[in-house]
Image: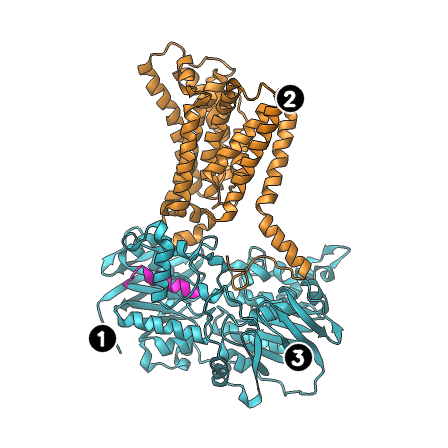
Chain colours: A orange, B cyan
């Protein structure tokens, strides 16, 4: 990875440490195992869906249907993972959620690759379909989720849920794959320039297809943890789509495709839930959290582009105006 | 020439239509191992479509393709590559945001592919074999166009193809690099690779090819033995009539004409200091091996490239700190990168033509469409722009016609003093070239002066009143009058010590 790619990771780590220290000093309730475990559990759904979203962003697309898919998974869980269900019946119950994710993934990927719809439009359609389907199954919050399942999902060592450790390992492996293997390189190449990638002899269609499939699959896994959080079959759709895109972008993903980091995404997801966790401790209304997140996204985007902005500024001071780097005159990297 | 080997690429009865346009009609071409088979034709004659079909990027409506004796089934670039076909695209197939080594890695089939961690070391070694010195860790987007073009060919060769397709492989190259490329191509053919060479530069084609196939309007005009062909005969096949006049008449040289542009000690990143005087009605050519500061100098005059020193236009100091100063003073740049820097590809011919002068075509802020149309129609006729209507998007025109649309703008502005043309006929077919030369000459007859930067010595010799040769960022020679000939220009370029630069990261200034 180039130095530039580390900027988002460094920024997110700094912000987490800074906000964490501030909270620990100001509020004794923050650094308790109970609160920290809660924080990590809250992070899981958004982290999982944001990791999936990072795949979509890497190939230059968006998936706004993830929120609908997660809700659909919660509603499905309220049928297939009801209290009193035997462990044997829970396995197909869990597989049903994954099945919803896989089906949605194939549906989205087909719309985007085979029918060549812009991903944001295609997934907006899917979002609406999933929303309707969720309301059809549960017109109001009803149906408790099996508490054994919830407990199993939330099993922790100390204050750290096993699942969080799993996700941490996953993102490190993910980044190693992305920046240290040929197939990871191929994913980034397709996001940077699909035409050239095709000419280079890559299966661009398969790569885009798999990226959106992976995105939905991760969203359905996130659905498990959302179900463990709400614990009832609620058809109300959250704003996970925007949050997941926000986390991916804060973590270093480029909306133009080809750039991003799974580790960065996890750190950003952790930071976003930290804001949500800390503000109530200080009895601050959550409206501030929303505004802070919005401001931070803008700040991060400016900061990540700082090298380019700085170069442009210097150039304009020196009296040259360049529309964009052009072959032959761009400085060597 | 060479002993004919087995057929490595066989294209049989291929037809392809894009909408109402029949790009190819029942075309058959084959290429044998060890042969250099050139395909020539005007822009829009179907050359690129033919290569696209052979390489699997474009699906043919009819016809079959066999690579290395085996029929193609899926028709994807990946399959063609695995059967032994390599392709160097005209517009390149490099992901600019990835490094040179990463691009090469992605282009390799499984059997010759290095591990990701070894990619840079592997790429350095491979590029050295081909005597191409570019930094493998640099982003492909940071290379010069010439370096990218050479890299494109080498990239295709690294996969060890049986047949190599080259689509206009020399458009961004200077004479020395063309020689380097041709040396490489000939060496490959000697070692048994079949080569399909598409170019619009006929002297190159005649110098290198064993056989030549001519396309016109998507129909093959036949395949000829290169040894029996002349440039005139090829042109006759390409355009269906003998080419009578290649360049418009020069005006009588006017040494005492007033000065339009005076450049004193202009210096930038990659050029200078340069002193130059441009007179009214003059076309000045800039020659040189690619990457010797010609482009940067031209763009500095237009205020697009940073420079120090002074420039005056008609006696007034020209502010070149931004493109606004030159534009207001009537110094206009025709960028070599038409699609990105001078045209709005999705907009119509009409919109692209009048975009700078809409105020003049309207009344109280509303454009009078009829007047606009009349203006554009008149210009389109004058410049012979080939199109179905002035509402056609510019991106659907051929390269030559796109360039003509860009050229309409100086015609609409009555106050243009200097036209700076960067590679005005790059990727432009023979017929359209003359129209462009004629248009430039017509403007200079009105008193406008022009500077033409071109990598084609023949073009400079035929079009310009005076040619300066640049090397390492400075003017090393000036040719005028009887000295102006393709040979003299090439000699001046080759003799000026402008050897290919060792790497892109080293500037050539001073």
In this view, B149 is above or below A20: below
The answer to whether dots 1 and 2 both sit on one chain is: no
Q: Contact (CB < 8 A) between labels 1 and 3?
A: no
Q: Which residues are magenta?
A: B149-162
Q: Nearer the viewer, residue A207 or B23?
A: A207
Q: Quadrant of residue B186?
A: bottom left
**In the image, which disc is placed on residue B278?**
3
Decide whether residue B150 is among the magenta residues: yes
Q: Position of residue B451 (x, y in %)?
A: 61, 75
Q: Position of residue A80 (x, y in %)?
A: 39, 17
Question: Which residue bears the numbered disc 1?
Answer: B3
Judging from the image, mark 1 belongs to the subunit labelled B
- For the point 44% across and 46% down, the residue is A188
Question: Which residue bears the numbered disc 2?
Answer: A282
Specify whether A141 is left or right of B282: left
Q: Quadrant of residue B447?
A: bottom right
In this view, B158 is above or below A250: below
Q: Secondary structure at mark 1?
A: loop
Q: Secondary structure at mark 3?
A: strand
The answer to whether dots 1 and 3 both sit on one chain is: yes
Q: Contact (CB < 8 A) between labels 3 and 2?
A: no
Q: Residues within 10 Å of mark 1 (few under 14, many from 20)?
A: few
Judging from the image, mark 2 belongs to the subunit labelled A
Q: Residues within 10 Å of mark 2 (few under 14, many from 20)?
A: few
> How many labels were placed on the picture?
3
Q: Nearer the viewer, residue B46 or A15?
A: A15
Q: Position of residue A171 (x, y in %)?
A: 43, 35
Whether residue B223 appears in this view of the structure is no
Residue furthest front in the image:
A25
Q: CA distance from mark 3 to mark 2?
A: 73 Å
Q: Nearer the viewer, residue A291 or A103?
A: A291
Q: Which label sits in the foreground, 1 or 2? A: 2
């Amino acid at each position: 990875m180039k130095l530039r790619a580390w900027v988002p990771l460094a920024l997110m780590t700094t912000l987490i440490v800074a906000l964490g220290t501030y909270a620990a000093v100001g509020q004794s309730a923050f650094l308790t195992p109970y609160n920290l475990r809660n924080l990590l559990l809250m992070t899981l759904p958004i982290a999982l869906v944001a990791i999936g979203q990072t795949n979509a962003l890497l190939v230059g697309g968006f998936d706004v249907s993830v929120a609908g898919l997660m809700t659909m998974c919660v509603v499905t869980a309220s049928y297939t993972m009801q209290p009193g269900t035997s462990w044997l019946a829970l396995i197909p119950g869990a597989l049903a959620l994954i099945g919803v994710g896989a089906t949605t993934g194939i549906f989205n990927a087909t719309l985007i690759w085979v029918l060549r719809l812009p991903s944001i439009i295609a997934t907006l359609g899917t979002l609406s379909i999933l929303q309707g389907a969720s309301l059809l199954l549960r017109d109001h919050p009803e149906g408790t989720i099996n508490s054994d399942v919830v407990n199993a999902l939330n099993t922790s060592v100390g204050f750290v849920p096993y699942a969080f450790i799993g996700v941490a390992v996953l993102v490190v492996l993910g980044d190693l794959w992305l920046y240290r293997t040929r197939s990871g390189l191929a994913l980034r190449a397709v996001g940077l320039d699909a035409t050239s990638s095709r000419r280079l002899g890559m299966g661009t269609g398969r790569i885009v297809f798999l990226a959106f499939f992976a995105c939905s699959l991760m969203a359905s896994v996130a659905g498990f943890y959302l179900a463990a959080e709400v614990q009832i079959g609620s058809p109300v759709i959250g704003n996970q789509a925007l949050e997941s895109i926000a986390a991916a972008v804060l973590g270093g993903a480029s909306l133009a495709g080809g750039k991003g980091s799974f580790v960065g995404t996890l750190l950003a997801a952790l930071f976003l839930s930290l804001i949500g966790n800390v503000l109530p401790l200080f009895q601050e209304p959550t409206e501030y959290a929303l505004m802070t997140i919005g401001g931070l996204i803008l700040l991060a985007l400016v900061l990540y582009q700082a090298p380019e902005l700085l170069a442009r500024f210097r150039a304009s001071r020196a009296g040259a105006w360049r529309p964009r780097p052009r072959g032959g005159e761009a400085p060597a990297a | 020439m060479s002993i004919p080997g087995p057929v490595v690429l066989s294209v049989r009865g291929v037809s392809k239509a894009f909408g109402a346009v029949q790009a190819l009609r029942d075309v058959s071409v084959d290429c044998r191992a060890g042969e250099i088979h050139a395909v020539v034709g005007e822009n829009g004659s179907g050359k690129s479509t033919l290569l696209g079909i052979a390489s699997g990027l474009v699906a043919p409506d009819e016809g079959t393709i066999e690579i290395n004796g085996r029929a193609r089934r899926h028709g994807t670039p990946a399959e063609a590559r695995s059967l032994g076909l390599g392709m160097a695209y005209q517009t390149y197939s490099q992901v600019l945001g990835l490094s040179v080594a990463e691009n090469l890695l992605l282009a390799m089939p499984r059997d010759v592919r290095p591990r990701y961690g070894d990619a840079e070391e592997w790429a350095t070694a491979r590029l050295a074999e081909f005597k191409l010195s570019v930094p493998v860790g640099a982003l492909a987007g940071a290379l010069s166009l010439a370096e990218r073009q050479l890299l494109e060919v080498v990239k295709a060769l690294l996969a060890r193809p049986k047949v190599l397709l080259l689509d206009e492989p020399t458009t961004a190259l200077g004479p020395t690099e063309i020689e380097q490329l041709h040396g490489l191509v000939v060496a490959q053919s000697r070692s048994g690779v079949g080569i399909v060479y598409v170019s619009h530069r006929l002297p190159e084609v005649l110098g290198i090819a064993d056989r030549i196939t001519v396309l016109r309007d998507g129909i093959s005009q036949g395949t000829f033995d290169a040894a029996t062909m002349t440039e005139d005969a090829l042109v006759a096949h390409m355009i269906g009539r003998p080419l009578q006049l290649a360049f418009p008449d020069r005006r009588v040289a006017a040494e005492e004409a007033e000065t339009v542009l005076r450049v004193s000690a202009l210096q930038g990143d990659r050029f200078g200091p340069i002193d130059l005087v441009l007179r009214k009605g003059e076309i000045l050519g800039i020659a040189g091996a690619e990457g010797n500061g010609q482009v940067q100098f031209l763009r500095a005059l237009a205020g697009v490239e940073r420079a120090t020193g002074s420039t005056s236009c008609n006696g007034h100091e020209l502010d070149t700190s931004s493109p606004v100063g030159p534009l207001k003073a009537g110094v206009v740049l025709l960028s070599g990168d038409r699609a990105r820097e001078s045209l709005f590809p999705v907009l119509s011919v009409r919109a692209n033509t009048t975009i700078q002068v809409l105020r003049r075509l309207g009344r109280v802020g509303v454009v009078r469409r009829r007047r606009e149309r009349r203006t554009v129609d008149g210009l389109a006729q004058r410049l012979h722009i080939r199109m179905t209507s002035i509402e056609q998007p510019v991106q659907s025109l051929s390269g030559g016609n796109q360039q003509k649309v860009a050229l309409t703008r100086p015609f609409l502005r009555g106050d243009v003093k200097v036209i700076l043309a960067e590679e005005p006929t790059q990727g432009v077919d023979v017929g359209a070239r003359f129209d462009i030369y004629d248009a430039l000459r017509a403007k200079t007859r009105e008193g406008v002066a022009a500077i033409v930067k071109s990598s084609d010595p023949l073009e400079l010799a035929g079009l310009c009143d005076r040619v300066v040769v640049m090397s390492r960022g400075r003017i090393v020679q000036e040719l005028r009058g009887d000295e102006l000939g393709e040979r003299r220009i090439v000699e001046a370029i080759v003799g000026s010590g402008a050897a290919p630069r060792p790497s892109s990261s080293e500037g050539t200034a001073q």
